[in-house]
Amino acid sequence: MSDTVSRRSVLRLLSGATAVALAATAGPPSLAHAATARRQPAAGPRVEGLLTKLTLDEKLSMLHGSTDPKALGQAGYVPGVERLGIPPLRLADGPAGVRVKQHATALPAPVLLAAAFDPGLARRYGQVIGREGRALGQDVLLSPMVNLIRTPYAGRNFETFSEDPLLSADLVAEEIKGIQSEGLIATVKHYAMNNQEKDRDSIDVRVDEQTLNEVELRAFEAAVGAGARAVMGAYNKVNGTYACESKELLTGILRDRWGFEGWVMTDWHAAHSTVASLTAGLDMEMPNGKYFGAALRTAVQNGSVSEEYVDRAVRRILTTMDDFGMLDGSAPPRPARNPSAGAAVALEVAKAGATLLHNRNGTLPLTGEAARSIAVVGPTGSLPFVSGGGSAHVIPDHAERPLDAITSRAGRGAQVSYALGEDLFGKPLPEDALAEGIDPEGQRVAAGKTWTYKGTLTVEDADEWTFVIHYSGTRPKVLLDGVDLFPVATGLAEHFTGGLVSAAPDGLAVRRRTLDLAAGEHRVEITAKGGAQGQTFRLRHATGATRAQDVAEAVEAARAAESVVLFAYEDATENQDRTTLALPGHQTGLIEAVTAVNPRTTVVLNTSSSTSMPWLERTAAVLQMYYPGQEGAAATAAVLFGDCDPGGRLTQTFPVDDAHHPVAGDTRRYPGVDGVEEYSEGVHVGHRWYDAEDVRPLFPFGHGLSYTSFVYEGLGVERTGDGLEVVFTVRNTGRRDGVDIPQVYVGASPDLQVDQAERVLGGYQRLALKAGESRKVTVRVDERTLSSWDAKRHGWVLGTGRRTVWVGASAGELRLSGRAQV
C-alpha cells in the first residue's frame, strides 16, 4: 500500500479505532444481535461523524450499484453523497489491464504472469494496473482473481494464476501490494470455490473442511494478509449456502479468523437475499439494488433487520475510502497514463512467462537458414491475439501482428511467407449462391430503416457449412429454412463471446453457426435494422472445400520454407467453459498436414489453459504463449530467435487427453450432478492428483525448457525456527545465458492422521545465470506449508517427523532429495 494508506491504517490501529467483524446470524437478527452490532469498536472519527449525518436512503445508496452519469465504460458505479463530501466509487474490471472505453495497457493474461514464478514481477504488474486505473478515473479494481485451476475446462483459467495454493498465494499477495501502492483499491475474487463457469450462478460446491482451508482458501488468506480492502463474493453455493450469504465464509473465516477490514461486494447479480446476506457479512450488492435498495429499506422500516447492520456495511466502505484519502482530499492527484512504461512491463512479463514445452534437436532458437526462410501459418499469426474474452478484454494502445514482428526480426533478405491455414471470419459467398437483391459483402442499412430479404441459397454439394455474420449495429436476424442462425443468447452469454473470434479485423462484431447442408436450394430470410446510426453487415461462409484450399495453401508455403512457425489458438471467455482439451476448429488437421511436409515446424500456442497434443511428436517445437497482451508479437519473436531465454514454467499440469486428468470421468466432480459438484479429490488438486493416482501427464507442473542446461547439486536441508531451509547449488552447464526455476517439494508427515498429498510445492526461485555460472540458492519452506488442516481440531497442525525434500526442474523431474526432522 502507499505510504499515505499505510500511515492512515497505522494511526487508526494505534488509536484502537479499527472496525472489526461482527458475528452475525444468517437469520433475522434479534435485539441481542443488534446490540452486538452496536458494541463493535468505532471507526475513525471522520467516518463515525459521517454516519451520524447520513440519512437511511443515503446509506442505502452506498450499498448497491447504480448508473454512472459519466459512462466511462467500467463495470460498476456507486454514487457518493455530495452534500457530505463523499465521492462516488467507480469499479473497473482489470485482471490484465483496466477495462474501460478508453485505451489501456493490455498486459499478458495472469496465467502468463504466473508462469514467470516471480512475485516481484507480479508486484510491478499490479503497479501498472494501479496507476492506470487511477489515471482512467477508477477507484476500485475488480481483480485479481485467485481461484485455483481445478478443471482444465474452466473458461477463466487464463484470468487466474495456478493449480497450486502456494504459488497462487505468493503471486496474489504481491500483485495486490502493487495495485494498492498506486492508490487503487484491489478486490480479490471470487470468494470462494468459483472454479468453473458452467452453472456458476447455481452450482452447489460440496467441499470438506480440510480441502476448503488447505486448497482454495490459502491464496485468499494471503490476499487479506497483503492488505486487500475489497472482496468479491462468488456466484456459486458452498456446502448448500450461496457464497454471498455464507456466514462461515464472510464473517467466521474472512473477518473473525483473518481479520479482514474492508468490504465484501457481490459478483454481478450474485445476490439472492436481503436480510440473510446483510447479516451474514455482505456489504454491497452489484451492479444494482434489487436486494439492498428498496427491499433493504423496507426490511429496516418493518424491523426485519436492525439499521445497525446497514451502518456496519457503510462503515466498512467509508473506512476503506478514508484510508485511501478519499474523504478528506488527501488522496494523491490522479496521475497521467504512462503508456511506454506500461508497454515495457507488458513486454517483460510476456518474455518472462513464455514457456517452451518441446524442442526437438534444438530447433529453437531459429538460427542460420531456419531464421532466413520461414513460413508463418495460422490466423493468429497475422491477427494479434491480445486477451481473452469477458471481464479480461482490454482496448490496447497498439498490438503488432506476429507476422510483422517475425519479418522484422528475420531481417533484410530473409524470406517470410504467410498462409492463413484456418479461416476465422469466413469467405465471400459464391457470386451465384444467393438471388439478387443483396450485397453479402457489404449490405448497408440506412438509419431508422428496416431492411428485409427473402431468397434462396443454392448449395452445389452436400457439405459442412459455417455461416459467419459481421455487423456494425443490432445483429441482423438470418433464417435458413426457418431456423435462426444467430439467435441472441440470454444474459451475459450474449456479451462474453471471446477475445478473438467475436470481432473482425475491421471492428465489426462477429457470430458464427456451423451445420450440415444438403445439396440444393435453401430458403433464406434476413431482417436487419439500421438503428440510429445505420449499419453495414456481411454474410460469409466456410465449407469443407474452402477449408481444404486454406490447408493446401499452408502446405505449399510450408514445403517451400526451411522452417515453419504455426500459430494455434483457443479463444476462452468468461461465462463459458471449454468442452475439450483439443484445439478448436480444424487446427489439428492443419498441424498434421503442415508437419507432414516440414518437420521443422514450431507450434506457438495462444491458448487459455492446457491443451491436448496428439500432433506433438510430429512437431519440432511447441511454445506456450497463452494470451500475451499488446506486446505479445515482440515477445514471441524475441523467444523464437533467441534474443531472450524462454523464462516460463507451467503453473498447471497439462493432461495427455480428456480422459486423464483430476475431474475426468466423474461428472460429480465436474460439471456436477443435479446442481451439486463434489470436490471428492480432496487436497489432491493439480499436480498432487497425478502423484496420488500415478498418472503420467503430457507435461508436469513446473515444466519448461531453456536454451541452455542446468544441474543441481549439494543439497542441504535444515530445520529453522518456523520452517525448513533448503540449500543447493544451480550451475548453468551450457553455452548460453539462461533462466532456470528450481522448485522445492516436501513429502508427507508420518505423524499426521489426516489426508496428505505425496508431496507439495514448498518453494521455488527464479534464477538468471550466465553461461558457466553457479549460484548457491536458499529456499525457505514455511510452517504453513509443513502443516495440514485438522477438521477435528478446526485448525492447522504442524506435520512433524522425518520429511522428505526434493529439488526438481518440475513436479515430474525431481533431481535431488534429502530428509529433515520436523
Image (spheres, rainbow, N blue to C red):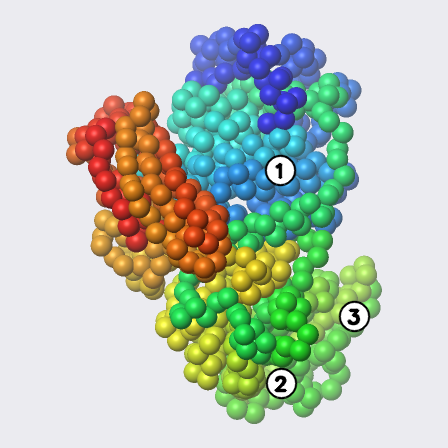
Query: Which residue is located at x 55 percent, y 85 percent?
Result: 560
Examine the rendering and report whether any part of residue 549 can be seen.
yes
Q: Nearer the viewer, residue 460 or 777?
A: 777
Give the residue at mark 1.
127
Q: Position of residue 294 (x, y in %)?
A: 62, 29
Give the residue at mark 3.
445
Kindly identify the amino acid type of the residue bearing the numbered disc 2. Leu
Q: Nearer the viewer, residue 114 or 238?
A: 114
Give the foreground label among 3 and 1: 1
Query: Which residue is located at x 59 percent, y 76 percent?
Result: 372
- In the image, 204: left or right of 554? left
Which corner quadrant of the image does residue 695 belong to? bottom left
Toward the front, the furthest residue is 772
Q: Nearer the viewer, residue 237 or 800?
A: 800
Give the residue at mark 2.
457
Query: Which residue is located at x 56 percent, y 37 percent?
Result: 123
